[in-house]
Amino acid sequence: MIVKDEEVKFCIKCGTKLIVKSDHEGKVRKMCAECDWIFYENPLPAAVCVILNKKREILLIKRKVEPSAGKWALPSGYVEIDQTPEKCAVVELKEETGLKGKIISFLGYNMQTSQICKKVISFGFHLKKIGGKLIPGDDALDAKFFPIKKIPELPFSSHKKFIQIIKKQKGIL
Ligand SMILES: [Zn+2]
């Protein structure tokens, strides 16, 4: 189930209904009137994988989970509390495509609005395949390489941005 930020109405510590007021810095936030728990809204970090084969085709997965289930996108996932963005990228690539990857470079980051939380901050990585076999994982309906000039419309602005960066780096117009 997806819980949107605006649907958070009760304190996660004591269950009291949240109120909206200014904190000590004067920022308006949702907080608990009973135990002082504050609902901080932060961007959710995600890692995004860009992987090319020798034919300069780019690896996409058909998403199984929301947001944008059924759409083709770069392998990606939300960074877990015990992961760095780099570790997350390598783990998501393996889980979604079966491929073992190694990070070559950091492509940059992108902020975008999200259906789940208000904002996602996506970290893009260029990886190379170092092993494994291409098999869609539990989080993906399909996984395959597309010619970089013939990729389907992607649902996320971050993915489009990272593909533009890699095209520029590789001199692909
Ligand atoms: Zn509380």
Image: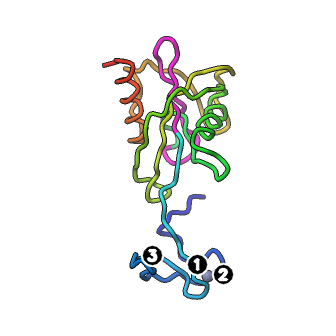
Looking at the image, the residue that sits furthest to the left is 173
Which residue lies at the image location 55% right of the left edge and 34% below the top edge?
Answer: 75
Residue 15, numbered label: none
Amino acid carrying mark 2 in the image: Cys
Q: Residues within 10 Å of mark 2 (few under 14, many from 20)?
A: few
Residue positioned 36% across, 29% down in the render: 164
Is 16 in front, or is 28? Answer: 28
Q: Which range is magenta?
A: 48-68
Q: Which residue is mark 3?
A: 29
Q: Observer-nearest residue: 168 or 62?
A: 168
**Does the residue tagged 3 have its C-beta within 8 Å of any atom of ligand 1?**
no
Residue position for label 2: 14
Disc 1 element: loop
Write the residue at 55% across / 87% down. 33
Q: Quadrant of the C terminus?
A: top left
Q: Amino acid at mark 3?
A: Arg
Going 62% across and 34% down the picture, which residue do you hit?
A: 90
Taking the magenta stretch, the answer to whether it contains residue 62 is yes
State which tag comes first along the sequence, 1 or 2.
Answer: 2
**Position of 101 relative to 120 (above/below):** above
Specify whether tag 2 is near ligand 1 (CB below 8 Å): yes
- Sequence-first disc among 3 and 2: 2
Residues under numbered marks 1 and 2 in contact, where contact means CB atoms less than 8 Å apart: yes
In the rendered structure, which amino acid carries the disc numbered 1? Answer: Trp
Q: How is the image coloured?
A: rainbow
Q: Position of residue 149 (x, y in %)?
A: 37, 20
Residue 84 among magenta residues: no
Name the quarter where the N terminus is drawn.
bottom right
